[in-house]
Amino acid sequence: MHILITGTSSGIGHGLAQEYLARGAKVWGISRRLASDLMDQDNFHHLQLDLTDHEAVEAQVPGFLSDTKRFDMVILNAGILGPVKWMSEVDADSMKQVMEINVWSNKVLLDKLFNLDKDIRQVIGMSTKASLRSTPGWGPYAVSKAALNMLMNVYANEHPDTHFIAFAPGLVDSEIQETIWNIKETDKYPAVERLQQARYTEDMPDSRAAAAKLIRGMEKARELESGSYADVREI
């Protein structure tokens, strides 16, 4: 299998890369930081790149992917939580940053992949249940992921030979959870308290422990209509 994953330096992207490599897949990873344990793997190819630098994406991605024409799966995993605040407290620049990372960087990368005429079987946009309903404090994250859901739907209509899915991975311990762990205003943001209570329990496995379940879920999601939303806990 040929797998492309963004955000492989930590969290879900790192766990998925580890699991795919253990299964003998070839993995291409793109992230801003290096993961030393992955760099030692013969089947791991890494590009250190900030995906919000669109000129660098245009310049560096073609050479990075020059030795393969196909991907069984492209996993658009890189993303940020953004500020946990009431939406009225979030300034426009902060909102633009979240949208740039969680939405537009994915569009730019997808456009480059299709312009390079890569044969892509499935694209996974890593989403969240927060994209379906508003939760106090989660405004920027929820809006960006709702936009990502629609981005997957739009591309599904434009590229019928590739299966697209907006995929919610459920509770997985990651850098985002580290940010949530350090939030003190739990009375103001009820979802924060629930996530803090779930951390370090079996309800929130680390990314490596969750990887096999996520892969099964993403594969099963191929049975759903292209461009739809799926939650690993419900399929």
Image (cartoon, rainbow, N blue to C red):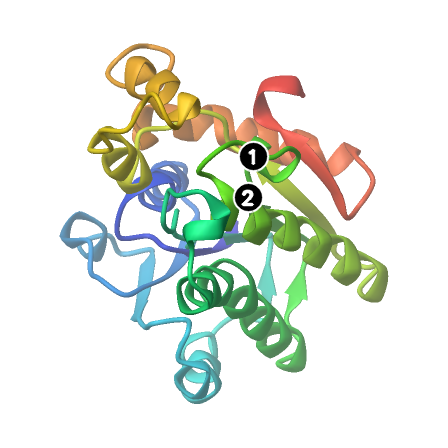
**Is the Cβ of the residue at disc 2 closer than 8 Å to that at disc 1?**
yes
Left or right: 168 with respect to 50?
right
Which element type, helix, strand or loop, lies under badge 2? helix
Instruction: List x then y, in percent, for residue 8.
Output: 33, 52
- The answer to whether residue 61 is above or below residue 95 is below
Disc 2 residue type (three-letter) = Ala
The residue identified by callout 1 is 130
Instruction: List x then y, in percent, for residue 28.
Output: 40, 61
The label shown at residue 142 is 2
Instruction: List x then y, in percent, for residue 15.
Output: 33, 38
Residue under the image location 61 percent in, 40 percent down: 131
Q: Earlier in the sequence, mark 2 or mark 1?
A: 1
- The answer to whether residue 211 is above or below residue 53 is above
Left or right: 141 with respect to 60?
right
Disc 1 residue type (three-letter) = Ala
Give the residue at the far left of this rendering.
36
Residue under the image location 29 percent in, 20 percent down: 196
Closest to the observer, 121 or 8? 8
Which element type, helix, strand or loop, lies under badge 1? helix
- The answer to whether residue 68 is above or below residue 11 is below
Instruction: List x then y, in percent, for residue 77.
Output: 46, 50
Can residue 77 be seen here? The reply is no
Q: CA distance from mark 2 to mark 1?
A: 5 Å
Location of residue 152 by image quarter: bottom right
The label shown at residue 213 is none
Closest to the observer, 6 or 135? 135
Left or right: 141 with respect to 131?
left
